[in-house]
Image (spheres, rainbow, N blue to C red):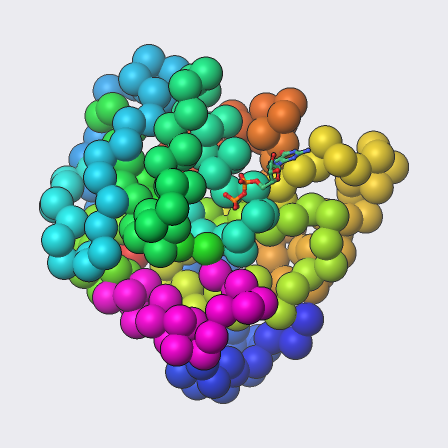
Amino acid sequence: VKRASVCCLARPMVSLSAALLARSVLLLPTGARRVGFATMSWIKEVDRSGVTFVNSFTDPAQMPRSTLPEITLVGRSNVGKSSALNCLSGRRKKVAQVSKTPGRTRLINLFSVGKACMITDLPGYGFAKVSVEMQEEWRKNVEKYLRLRDNLRAAVVFIDSQREPQQVDAQILDFLMYNEIPALVVATKVDKLKSSQLQPCMAALRKGLQLSPDQPIPFSSVTDTGRKEVWNYLEEMCTSGNGRT
Ligand code: GDP
C-alpha cells in the first residue's frame, strides 16, 4: 500500500521517514496528562461494569462532555467492528446491536465503560458504493468530532486479518496521524486463519501499513483472542500520557 497524500482527506505530502518519525513520537509518552482515572485496571472495570450504550448523535457538537478518556473505533464496514465491541464488553447482551439499527449506521454512537473510559463507534468508512459526497460528509463529520472531543486519547483501527493491506486503511491511519490521534491497529477474525498463516498475515499488514513491531493485535470475537491485550494497550495509551495533550 502506498502511503502518500490522499486528496479526499486533504493531507499534505509527507515523506516516509517523517511519517514514521511522527508516528513513533506520537506513541512515546509526552509528559503525562491523565484524564480521569480508574480505581482498578480497565479490564477489571469492564468485567465489572460492561459497556453501556449512551446515545447516538448526528452532530458531534451535541455529544455530552466527559472527563474520562475517550477511545474511538473505526474500520471499514463488515470488518467485525460491532462484533469486536460486543466481545470487548465481555457481556452476552450485545451492546453494539444498536449501531446496526437502520438509520444509526451513519451516526456516532457513544458508550461508557464504568469509571474507565468512553467509547465512540464511528460510521464505517470505505464503502465501495458510497458516493464522493457521502465520503466528504464522513470526513467532515469525523474531523469535527476529532476537533471537538478534547478527551479523545486513542483510536482503534480494525482491519481484516485475511485481507491484504488496504489503501483505505492506510489513509485512515494517515488521517489519524495528521490529527494527532494515536492509533491501535487490531486485526480481526484471526480464528479464520490457519495457525501457520497467522504470523505471515500479521507481518504483511505490519509492513503494508508501516505499523510498529507490536502491531497489529491479532483479534477474534469468536475466540476472544486479543480481548485482554486490547484493553491493556488502551489503558496504557490513555493513562500514561501517550494521548494528545
Ligand atoms: P461491522 O460491520 O464492522 O460492525 O462488522 P460485524 O461485526 O457486523 O461483522 C461482519 C461479519 O463478520 C459478521 O457476519 C460477523 O459474524 C463476522 N465476524 C465478525 N467478527 C468475527 C470474528 O472474529 N470471527 C469470525 N469468524 N467472524 C467474524
Seen at 29% across and 56% down, the residue is: 244
> From this viewpoint, which residue is outermost toward the top?
48
63 or 34: nearer the viewer? 63
Which percent across, then down, holds residue 245?
Answer: 24, 56
Q: Using the rendered image of the protein, determine whether residue 181 is visible from the camera's viewpoint.
A: yes
Q: Residue at x 38, y 28 (%)?
A: 95
Q: Is residue 92 left or right of residue 221?
A: left
Quarter residue 238 falls in: top left
- Residue drawn at (62%, 44%) of the image: 187
Q: Is residue 192 left or right of residue 93?
A: right
Give left or right: position of 23 versus 146. right
Front-most of residues 176 and 243: 176
State the predominant SS element of the stretch in magenta.
Answer: helix
Q: Identify whether 174 is placed above or below 190.
A: below
Q: Nearer the viewer, residue 125 or 210?
A: 125
Instruction: Please tell me which residue is depicted at 53% across the width and 55% down the height of the picture.
Output: 76
Give the extent of the magenta segment. 125-144
Compared with 177, 229 (above or below) is above
The answer to whether one can see residue 245 in this image is: no
Say which of 96 and 118 sits in front.
96
